[in-house]
Amino acid sequence: MHTIEEAAARAVALARRMRHLFIATADAAGLPHLAAAEEMALRADGRLAVTAWFCPQTVVNLSANPRISVVAWDSAADDGLQVLGEAEAVEEVAFLDGLAPGEEAHPLPQVERRIVIRPTRTLVFTLAPHTDREE
């Protein structure tokens, strides 16, 4: 049995190796939303920091419902972890600097954000038959 910190560190290493991870949120009514990101880090305080150009729905969902699931999975090896937790903060870390002359506005995210997550539980994530046992 691993501690939550050890399991979170393993998830970060797996996400770094795979260069992608998945983030699941839900709105206040429970409607799920799935997003992808490339970068996750483990902070010194044990929190996870996931940074991406998140679509607006991810941010809206977290403002109404801070519960979050982050999955790092190596599909070739069928080895993965799901980290469950609560988003404690959504920080703005970069902004697009307006539009180029003549460029039309588009609906793509204009702000890069970092979600700070307090992990509460980790589960094995695999395609193979498994139980949702804690890592």
Image (cartoon, rainbow, N blue to C red):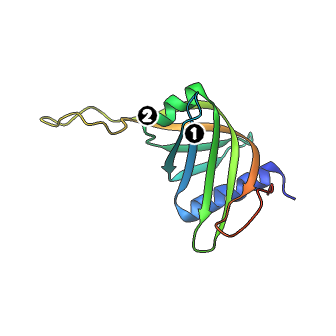
Residue that carries the numbered disc 1 in the rendered image: 25
Determine whether the residue tagged by mark 2 lies in a helix, strand or loop: helix
Q: Position of residue 92 (x, y in %)?
A: 48, 31
Identify the disc placed on residue 69: none
Identify residue for label 2: 56
Would residue 60 appear left or right of 100 to someone viewing this image? right
At x 54%, y 51%, the residue is 39
Rendering coords of residue 24 (x, y %): 57, 44
Task: Give, as a three-letter code, the residue at label 2.
Answer: Pro
Q: Horizontal placement of 35 versus 9: left or right?
A: left
Residue 110, compared with residue 69, is above or below; it is above
- Mark 1 secondary-structure assignment: strand
Task: Using the image, determine if residue 32 lies above or below residue 135.
Answer: above
Q: 30 or 102, which lies in front?
A: 30
Residue appearing at x 68%, y 43% in the figure: 43
Residue 95 is situated, as x and y percent measured from the top left of the image, at 38, 34
Task: Answer with mark 1 or mark 2, whichever residue precedes in sequence.
Answer: 1
Q: In the image, residue 111 lies at what x, y percent?
A: 41, 34
Up/down of 119 relative to 124, above or below: above
Q: Residue at x 71, y 59 (%)?
A: 10
Q: Residues within 10 Å of mark 2 (few under 14, many from 20)?
A: few
